[in-house]
């Protein structure tokens, strides 16, 4: 209207002006152009960005070009049924080089969207970047409830690059997408071409084990078990987001339970990592520039996957019954031996009662009542009436007195033997000298005699020594409580972390034979430790029975209990039985989640057992001078301290191994000196001067042999063994420092044990039938146990993936593996070793202590 009024006014004013007729048409043209430019901008822009839609077909390769001005959408459809799953795989290859902008592929499905770019950039350590131009991805298959349904999906291809980029696209069906039970399927995977497959639990199968294997160590791979849901995390940078997963080189195995997957099915995902460091492979070089792309090379890997049914609940029951049956049989056998022993004891008591009425016994009794014995042979019966307190207070028997000239001390008169039995314990201390005026009471002289008898080293009051050795038991019981409680708390935390995160690289199981039960991932490894607990308890019962019988004999003034045999102190035996039970408990805790950080749980009480056995061997012939509980446990604490340091800092650390070897050799020399001189030496500022003087007088001035030949032989052999072990550790520097330290303890124990038995036979003593059977049985069991120990089904010194290369299938009842058999046999062997220590000197129960040699 504005233009129209303006036209009219101009027409009236300038009527007849023929030269201005074209002006209205010019205005109309301008208005039309203004309207066209404002409302039609969208159509102009649309003409610059072209969207191309195509009907896609399976198994057809599309070679196309994409730029920033065009976008291609491929439409596909396929039929899905509820009882059959068919996989769909999208493969993409970019043919152009030196792209400034990647191509973006977006796959739109019914319930999921999958997007990825090509080239795909995967990151490694230290922000290293690896480009991949060839990609293959399997599409997530949403479930359907209908018998048959047609589902559509679209593949959108776009880029922001101005230059044309050539690509190839191929969509194909995966015929073997669903894995079959007990059927091996082979496939190829790479970092940019992960693979995953579906498995459905068959009827009647509640647990399966998924095994993935390859003939190639590298490239490093990851296998994952994920629930049936979209999206599926199948790239190196997201495969650890959900489900259970573990790294692998040649072997990988995960046990899957139906209760963890409500859909009764799961995905088996296999991803090849961009780098091999996680599997112990070589470290790559650092990038020269932060944004530099590194050629990853060919990282394809051929793998096999098979899903097999795991054991049923009946196998669990059989495994537990088998375990209980083995160790309960030892209880029955012990009960049978005890019954036979009691029967023989009753017969012996009957013969003794008959012998009490003989004329010879009557004459002996008359001599005891104050009459002068008729012959020197009656001295033995006189000595038999002396109380154990009098014997342990330092009075040697007449036989040892008769040979006083050989030892260089005077014969004691008989009247000094009858020392009062009612002497107060409060006046007796362990380190006091015996309160006798004779030279034989000075322990400095007694212990330096060339030939020592047990009576020379059992002079202290037996009640004081009994209390001293009972401290071993109470101390180890206290240590066990304070040690076990945080261990149990820690392993429960470990197991919770494993179950929540699904990271099975935290624990070093034998995954080929790891049977879960509840929250426990390897119940069989825990159950097999039951033998340590049950046999440790049985040993405590045997020791308790012996302790009761011995105390009853003492209360009855039994002559053999008072004066004969090795002095009976049971405190160390109680400590050994408790240590065996704790070894079982802590080994079970360790196997809840065995790894690098908690290996000391499995070995701490092994050191305790080895140390206590050596102390018990030494105590048998040296009851007065054996180490106190506080000193012994302090030394064992130092050993465990070095074990922890070695595990944490010892791997390849030359400085640590030098320091440890020096300490090992010095400790060996100090202990050798302590044993050789029976504790009669001092470590002070004058020790070097005395050593030089001894070397000068015994080696330079005159060549004289050692005074104590037997002890010197043992100590020389011990030093050779320990110096050799120290040299081996310094040269080889083994990664498993805890096992190396345990090997040192076991070698020393076996050496001392062999020396003890040889010297026992050399001294004319004999080994009774029960002890001999225990020795032979224990030696055979130890041999088989060590065989299974060295099978090495896993090792925490390597990466979790390398450790799985040693995994093996179960070998016993489809439930127990080689390491479980080691648990069975080693617990039996330790129990047998304890019985050997307990029964080895039973032949001396009727031999007077002044006739039992010390060695």
Image (cartoon, grey):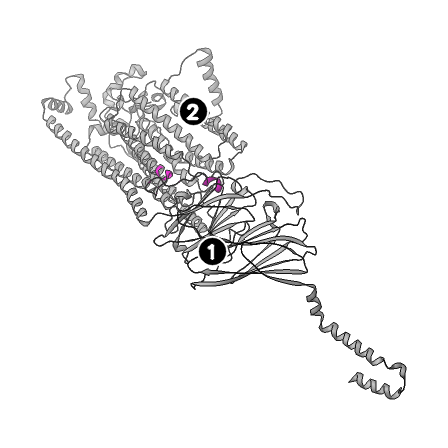
Count numbered badges in the picture.
2
State the residue position of label 1.
86
Q: Which mark is residue 721?
A: 2
Going by the image, does 816 lie left or right of 15?
left
Going by the image, does 833 lie left or right of 562?
right
Q: Is residue 814 magenta?
A: yes
Which quarter of the figure is the C terminus placed in?
A: top left
Q: Which residues are magenta?
A: 798-821
Q: Is residue 782 above or below residue 312?
A: above
Label 2: which secondary element: helix
Rendering coords of residue 514 (x, y %)? 39, 45
Rendering coords of residue 807 (x, y %)? 42, 40
Residue at horizontal 27 percent and vertical 16 percent from the top: 403
Q: Residue 428: in sight, yes or no? A: no
Q: Main secondary structure of the magenta part?
A: loop
Rendering coords of residue 826 (x, y %)? 34, 35
Q: Is residue 708 magenta?
A: no
Residue at the top extreme, as displayed: 702
Mark sitting earlier along the chain (2/1): 1
Residue at horizontal 74 percent and vertical 73 percent from the top: 36
Going by the image, does 665 lie left or right of 40?
left
Rendering coords of residue 823 (x, y %)? 35, 38
Q: Residue 86: in sight, yes or no? A: yes
Q: Residues within 10 Å of mark 2 (few under 14, many from 20)?
A: some
Residue 792: quadrant of the picture: top left
Label 1: which secondary element: loop
Which quarter of the figure is the N terminus placed in?
A: bottom right
Residue at horizontal 33 percent and vertical 31 percent from the top: 616
Residue 721: quadrant of the picture: top left
Q: Nearer the viewer, residue 564 or 306?
A: 306
């Amino acid at each position: 209207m504005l233009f129209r009024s303006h036209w009219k006014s101009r027409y009236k004013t300038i009527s007849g002006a023929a030269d201005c007729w074209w002006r209205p048409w010019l205005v109309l043209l301008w208005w039309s152009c203004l309207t066209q430019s404002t409302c039609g901008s969208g159509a102009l822009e649309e003409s610059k960005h072209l969207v191309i839609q195509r009907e896609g077909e399976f198994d057809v390769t599309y070679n196309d070009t994409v730029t920033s001005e065009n976008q291609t959408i491929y439409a596909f459809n396929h039929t899905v049924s509820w009882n059959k799953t068919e996989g769909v795989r999208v493969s993409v290859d970019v043919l152009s080089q030196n792209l400034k902008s990647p191509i973006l592929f977006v796959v739109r499905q019914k319930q999921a969207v999958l997007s990825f770019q090509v080239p795909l950039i995967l990151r490694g350590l230290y922000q290293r970047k690896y480009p991949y131009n060839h990609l293959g991805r399997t599409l997530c298959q949403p479930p359907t409830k209908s018998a048959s349904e047609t589902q559509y999906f679209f593949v959108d291809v776009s880029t922001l690059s101005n230059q044309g980029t050539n690509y190839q696209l191929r969509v194909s069906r995966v015929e073997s997408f669903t894995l079959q039970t007990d059927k091996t399927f082979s496939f190829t995977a790479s970092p940019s071409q992960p693979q995953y497959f579906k498995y459905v639990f068959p009827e009647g199968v509640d647990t399966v084990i998924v095994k993935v294997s390859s003939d190639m160590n590298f490239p490093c791979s990851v296998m994952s078990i994920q629930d049936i849901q979209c999206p599926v995390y199948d790239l190196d940078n997201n495969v650890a987001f959900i489900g259970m997963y573990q790294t692998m080189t040649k072997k990988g195995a995960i046990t899957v339970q139906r209760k963890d997957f409500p859909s009764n099915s799961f995905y088996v995902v296999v991803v090849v990592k961009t780098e091999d460091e996680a599997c112990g492979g070589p470290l790559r070089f650092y990038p020269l520039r932060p944004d530099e792309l590194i050629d990853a090379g060919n990282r394809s890997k051929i793998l096999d996957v098979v899903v097999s049914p795991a054991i049923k609940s009946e196998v669990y029951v059989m495994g537990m019954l088998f375990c209980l049956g083995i160790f309960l049989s030892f209880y029955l056998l012990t009960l049978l031996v005890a019954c036979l022993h009691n029967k023989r004891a009753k017969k012996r008591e009957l013969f003794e009662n008959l012998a009490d009425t003989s004329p010879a016994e009557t004459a002996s009794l008359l001599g005891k009542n104050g009459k002068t014995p008729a012959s020197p042979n009656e001295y033995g019966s006189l000595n038999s009436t002396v109380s154990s307190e009098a014997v342990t207070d330092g009075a040697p028997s007449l036989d040892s007195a008769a040979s006083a000239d050989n030892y260089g001390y005077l014969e004691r008169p008989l009247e000094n033997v009858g020392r009062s039995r009612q002497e107060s314990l409060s006046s007796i201390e362990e380190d006091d000298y015996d309160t006798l005026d004779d030279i034989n009471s000075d322990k400095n002289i007694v212990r330096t005699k060339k030939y020592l008898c047990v009576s020379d080293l059992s002079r202290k009051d037996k009640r004081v020594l009994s209390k001293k050795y009972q401290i071993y038991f109470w101390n180890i019981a206290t240590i066990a409580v304070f040690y076990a409680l945080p261990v149990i708390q820690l392993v429960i935390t470990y197991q919770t972390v494993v179950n929540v995160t699904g990271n099975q690289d935290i624990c070093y199981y034998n995954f080929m034979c790891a049977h879960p039960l509840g929250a426990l991932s390897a119940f069989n490894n825990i159950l097999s430790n039951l033998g340590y607990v049950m046999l440790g308890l049985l040993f405590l019962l045997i020791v308790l029975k012996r302790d009761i019988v011995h105390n009853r004999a003492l209360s009855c003034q039994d002559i053999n209990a008072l004066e004969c045999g090795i002095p009976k102190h049971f405190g160390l035996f109680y400590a050994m039985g408790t240590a065996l039970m704790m070894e079982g408990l802590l080994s079970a805790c360790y196997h809840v989640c065995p790894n690098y950080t908690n290996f000391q749980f499995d070995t701490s009480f092994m050191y305790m057992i080895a140390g206590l056995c050596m102390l018990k061997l030494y105590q048998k012939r040296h009851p007065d001078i054996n180490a106190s509980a506080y000193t012994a446990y302090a030394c064992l604490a130092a050993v465990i301290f070095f074990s922890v340091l070695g595990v944490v800092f010892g791997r390849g650390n030359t400085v640590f191994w030098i320091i440890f070897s020096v300490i090992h050799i010095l400790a060996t020399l100090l202990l050798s000196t302590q044993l050789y001189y029976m504790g009669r030496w001092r470590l002070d500022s004058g020790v070097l001067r005395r050593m030089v003087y001894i070397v000068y007088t015994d080696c330079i001035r005159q060549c004289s042999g050692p005074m104590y030949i037997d002890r010197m032989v043992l100590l020389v052999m011990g030093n050779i063994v320990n110096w050799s072990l120290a040299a081996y550790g310094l040269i080889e520097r083994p990664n498993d420092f805890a096992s190396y330290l345990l090997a040192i303890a076991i070698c020393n124990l076996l050496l001392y044990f062999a020396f003890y038995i040889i010297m026992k036979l050399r001294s004319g003593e004999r080994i009774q039938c029960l002890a001999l059977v225990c020795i032979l049985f224990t030696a055979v069991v130890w041999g088989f146990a060590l065989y299974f120990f060295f099978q090495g089904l896993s090792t925490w010194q390597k990466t979790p993936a390398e450790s799985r290369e040693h995994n093996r299938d179960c070998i016993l009842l489809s439930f127990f593996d080689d390491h479980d058999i080691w648990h069975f046999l080693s617990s039996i062997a330790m129990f047998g070793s304890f019985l050997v220590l307990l029964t080895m000197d039973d032949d001396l129960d009727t031999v007077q202590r002044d006739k039992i040699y010390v060695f």
